[in-house]
Amino acid sequence: MKPSDPEWYDAIKGNPLQRSTFTDELAATIIQRAKDSSEHRKPKFKQVSLAGLGILCFLGFLLIANEAQLFHTTIQPDSTIGNRTANPNPPVERMESTSTEKNLSNQSWETLINQGNQGAAKTFIYKESLLNDVTLVFSKQISNFAETELTTLGVNMFKWNSSDWSTEQSATYSVQESDRRKNIITAWVELDTIPIFFGMAPNKTITQIRISDENHTPYEATILREHSGAVYWFAALPEKKDGYTVEALTADGTILESQTYYYH
Amino acid sequence: MLHESYLKHLVSMEPIHLEAIMESYGQDVWNFAYFLTKNRMMADDITQDVFLQAYRHITSFRGEASVKTWLLKITRNISYNYLQTAFIRKVLLVNKAMPQEFSRSAEQAFLEKEATNEVWKHVFRLPVKFREVLVLHAKYELPLHEISQVLKIPEGTVKSRLFGARKKLSLLLKEEWINETV
């Protein structure tokens, strides 16, 4: 205690309550939840080792399927205005994918995001160009392990380096089974200072996703509807702010979900 | 205990790192969530969210401030998020099941019984903007510039709030002392 501090300062140095409230049980719950999220987050190589030959066969099938373009999916954007936003568990990868053409078709982007990919094939969903020299590619990856289908959403950031596109950073978000009961699944990440929000909308009545920063500046996410009925959304924001509120709205303007996320 | 310089270079955290951080700061985080919300259940939920957030976003820790300050900042953000959104829903649910005042008085009774000393009881009677600045300075012993980061207010505002909080608490304690001696 400094001489200038009030004499009662010492009385509030310790715990406010007589009992310990951060219990072993609470700690165990947190560890379990962290482990559960890790299982979904970075399972590829661990699960390959567990599933052994069966998975290798599956990967072989994927390679053949990819050649035959069985997994090519056409997605219709609801809007092309979109921009800006987020993800909670971003294992950042660095890759060496390159392309010497600047204007690429969606199929070419899909090829690029799959270069060096050891897991299930990634399917192109959407791309967004920023400042002409940066392109964000939004994709999904469906894996099947132990009769469970695992969807992983991903964003790759490509930069044009005078003669080719190369991947600088990427981030993925594994959709959990419990997520599918939500109105909206939201992931957020920051790639090279660009805040990015993306996800899915299990509730099909959602027609608009609005993201507002702490100054209440609104941005509209691009909504992408797959022929299968799955709805994805994506937004890259112009600058990093401390907090963003993501709102999911129906056609009549009803806000079904509103959640605030913070970049720390 | 994990060294902070090690943490700031981590790209992803393993459960063993999380255990080490929780061992060092678990009670601090829970306490701060409780200081802000005065609700044990909410403090439990917030504490879970804080450590999961830290686990998933270890890359956001870059060592500019201490791990404790980083965790307290996350705690405050999530607590305010709860107070603004989840709290409203919970109160609505509480209202269905029992009167809101009952819930509040149950927490107050718990505090009266479990508080370590009389000063803490008075701390919890302060408005939240005084409460948070006071505990960050007195209990957590953060320097003013780090309190400014956690609260997202200028350092000058921290000083004036701290002055106000100390004055208010000194008055409350003085009143109690007078009442006891009469």
Image (cartoon, grey):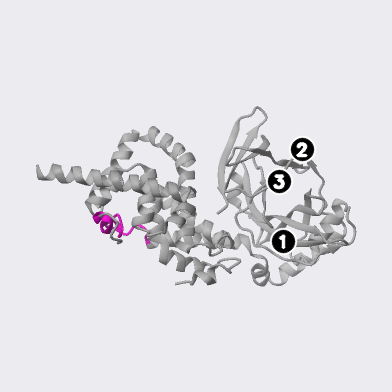
- Alpha carbon of mark 1 to alpha carbon of mark 3: how far? 17 Å
Amino acid type at image mark 3:
Phe
Residue located 46% across and 69% down the image:
B20
The residue wearing badge 1 is: A169
Whether residue A109 is visible: yes
Q: Chain of mark 3?
A: A
Under circle 3, the secondary element is strand
Badge 2 and badge 1 both on one subunit:
yes
For disc 3, the marked residue is: A234
The residues tagged by marks 3 and 2 sit, at their Cα atoms, a distance apart of 11 Å
Residue matched to label 2:
A79
Q: What amino acid type should be assigned to the residue bearing mark 1?
A: Gln
Earlier in the chain: of badge 1 and badge 3, it is 1
Residue A197 horizontal/vertical position (percent)? 66, 48
| Contact (Cβ within 8 Å) of mark 3 with mark 2 | no
Tell which tag, 2 or 1, sits nearer the viewer: 1
Task: Please tell me if label 1 and label 3 are on a single chain.
Answer: yes
Q: Residue B175: horizontal and vertical position, in percent?
A: 19, 42
User: Is A47 or A263 nearer to us in this picture?
Assistant: A263
The chain to which mark 1 is attached is A
